[in-house]
Image (tube, coloured by chain):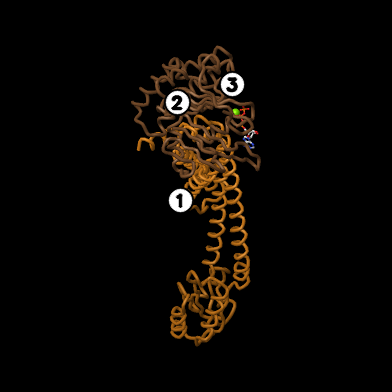
Chain colours: A orange, B brown
Amino acid sequence: MRNFWFSLKEGLLGFKRARLASIITITSLALALLLTGYFILFSLNVNHWIGEKRSQMELEVFFENDLNNAKAKEATAQIQQIPGAARVIYISKKAAAERFEKEFGRNIYDILDSNPLPPSCKVRLKPGFQTSAAVQKMVLQIGRINGVSDVVYEKELLRLIDYYVTWIYIILGGFGLILLLIAVILLYNTIRLTIFARRDIIEIMGLTGATASFIKRPFIIEGFLQGVLGALAASGLLYLSVEAIRRLLFSSLAMQDNIYLILVAAGILIGVVSSALSLSRYLDKI
Amino acid sequence: MIEFYNVDLNIDKKTILRDVSFRVLKGEFVYLTGASGAGKSTVLRLLYMDLFPDRGTVIIERYSSAKIKDKEIPYLRRQLGVVFQDFKLLPDRNIFDNTAFALRVIGMPGKEIKKRVLRVLTDVNLSHKRNHYPEELSGGEQQRAAIARAVVNNPIAVLADEPTGNLDSDNSMEIMEILQKINQNGTAVLMATHDNELISAFPHRIIEIKEGRVGR
Ligand SMILES: Nc1ncnc2c1ncn2[C@@H]1O[C@H](COP(=O)(O)OP(=O)(O)OP(=O)(O)O)[C@@H](O)[C@H]1O
Ligand SMILES: [Mg+2]
C-alpha cells in the first residue's frame, strides 16, 4: 500500500520531471484522438443520413381504378399484414382528388368528367426491410393481392444507396482502421521515446534493488494520466466542435455521448499499453 | 561471504575472465586492481548479477549465480551497495530522494526513511545539500551522495567501481576516508581501482586481475 502511494506520487511527479515530454505526449494524443473523434462523428452522420434516406423510402400502391372503396380498404388491410410493412395510409379516390386540387390548384372535375385517379395506399417500411432485395420481395407479395394494379417506388435511388453504402462502409472502416493504426504507432513511439530518454534512470533504479514492477508502476500511472488528459482535451475540443457545427452549419448534426467514452477508453488504453510495452525492453533483465 | 569459484566469462566469444577464484570475507576491505580492460568492472557486474558466468559460480551470502531466479535479483542487490565512477545518481530528483530511493524500494515507512537518510547524509557531510539536485553538486559531493545511497540500507558489502576515478586527490581522499569509516562499521568494501597512490595511503588486501586471471 505504501508502495502504491509512492508510485502514485512518482507517477504524478513524472509529469513535472519530464514536463516537455509530457506536454508533447498529451498534445499528440489529444490531436490523434480528436481526429479519431471527428472521424467517428463523420461516420455517425453518414450512417444517420443513410438511415434517414432509407426510412423515408415508401411504396406507393395503386389499386385498379374501378375498385370500390370497401374492396380497396380490404386490400390495404392485407398489405398491412405483409412482413416489412410499417404504417400504411389509404388514399381513396376522393382523397386523391383533394390532393390533386391542393397540389395543382384546380379541381379535377373541372378538367375531366370523371375522376381518373385510382385509390392507392402509401406503405412505409420497417427498418431491416429498407433494402432493394427486401423491397422487391414485398412488391411481389403486394402485386399478388387482388385489386392491386401497380406498385411504385424510387427503385433507382434505393439501388444506388444499396450499392454505395457497402462501399461507403468499407471505405470508412478502412480509413478508420488506418487512422487508428497511425495514432497508435505515433503515440507508442512518442511514449517509447520519453521512456528511452529515461533508460538510465530505469537502469539505476534496477541497480538500487528496485523490482521490475516497482519501477514500472509510476510509468504506467503516468501513461494512464497522459491518456486521460489527452482524451479529456480531445473530448472537450470535439464537444466544442459539435456545438459550433450545430450552431453555424447543421443544427441536426447527429452525436452520441458514448463517443466521448470511447475516446477516454482509447486514450487510457494507448497510454497504459504503450508505457508497458516500452518499459518491458528495459526491464527484462531485472 | 563473497565467493568466486572457477569463473569463466566470455562476451561475444571473447574470453574476459578465465578460471577466476577468490573470496572476500565479512567486513573485509579489498582492492581489485588491474590494467584498463583487465576485467575489474566485469567482476563487479558478476557480483551484482548483471552478468552471469559461463562456467563456475558466484556466491553472495545465500545467493548463488547458479540458482538465483530473475525475480530474486532485486533482493540480492538490496544486500549490496554499488558505487560507480560516474556516480549514477537519479538526475530527476534531489539528493534526499536519491538516497531515500534505496529505502523506498523496500517499502520502508516515510518517517523511518527520513530519519535514516538524514543520518547517512550527515555521515557523508551532505545534509545541508539534501534539497539540491545532482547537477547542482560538485563531483566529490555527487560521489558522497552515491555512497550515502549505497549504505543507507545497511548492505553487507559496498562494491565501488573506481569511485575516485573522476575526482581530484583531495576529493579522492575524502571518499577513501568515508569508505574506511563504512568498513570500520562492519561493512565489507570491494573497490576496483588502479590508483596506486590511494592503495599505499590506505593499504588493504589486493586482488589483481591480469589477462583475465587472478594473480596470487
Ligand atoms: N559489453 C561488452 N561487450 C564486449 N566487450 C566487453 C563488454 N564489456 C566489457 N568488455 C570487455 O571486457 C574486458 C574487461 O572490461 P572491464 O570493463 O571489466 O575492464 P576494467 O578492468 O573495468 O577496465 P577499466 O579500468 O578501463 O574500467 C575489456 O576487454 C572490454 O573490452
Ligand atoms: Mg571498469
Instruction: Decide: few, some or many residues near mark 3? Use Cα within 10 Å; few <14, some 14-19, many ≥20.
Output: some
The subunit letter for the residue under badge 2 reads B
Q: Quadrant of the N terminus of chain B?
A: top left
- Identify which residue, B1 or A122, lies in the foreground: B1
Q: Position of residue A120 (x, y in %)?
A: 51, 78
Q: Position of residue B117 (x, y in %)?
A: 40, 23
Q: Residue at x 51, y 29 (%)?
A: A17
Could you tell me how far apart the alpha carbons at marks 3 and 1 are, in whole angstroms?
62 Å
- Identify which residue, A269 or B41, lies in the foreground: B41
Residue B157 quadrant: top left
> Ligand 1 is in which quadrant of the figure?
top right
Residue A168 quadrant: bottom right
The subunit letter for the residue under badge 3 reads B
Q: Residue at x 37, y 26 (%)?
A: B113
Q: Which residue is mark 2?
A: B188
Could you tell me how far apart the alpha carbons at marks 3 and 2 are, in whole angstroms?
20 Å
The yes-or-no answer for disc 3 within 8 Å of ligand 1 is yes
Q: Position of residue A222 (x, y in %)?
A: 48, 38
Quick check: marks 2 and 1 in contact, CB under 8 Å? no
User: Which label is found at residue A46?
Assistant: none
Q: Kindly state the secondary structure of the residue where label 3 is placed.
A: loop
**Vertical placement of residue A78 versus B112, above or below:** below
Q: Which residue is mark 3?
A: B165
Instruction: Decide: few, some or many residues near mark 2? Use Cα within 10 Å; few <14, some 14-19, many ≥20.
Output: many
Give the foreground label among 2 and 1.
Answer: 2
Give the foreground label among 3 and 2.
Answer: 2
Whether marks 3 and 1 lie on the same chain: no
Give the foreground label among 3 and 1.
Answer: 3
Residue A171 appears left or right of B64: right
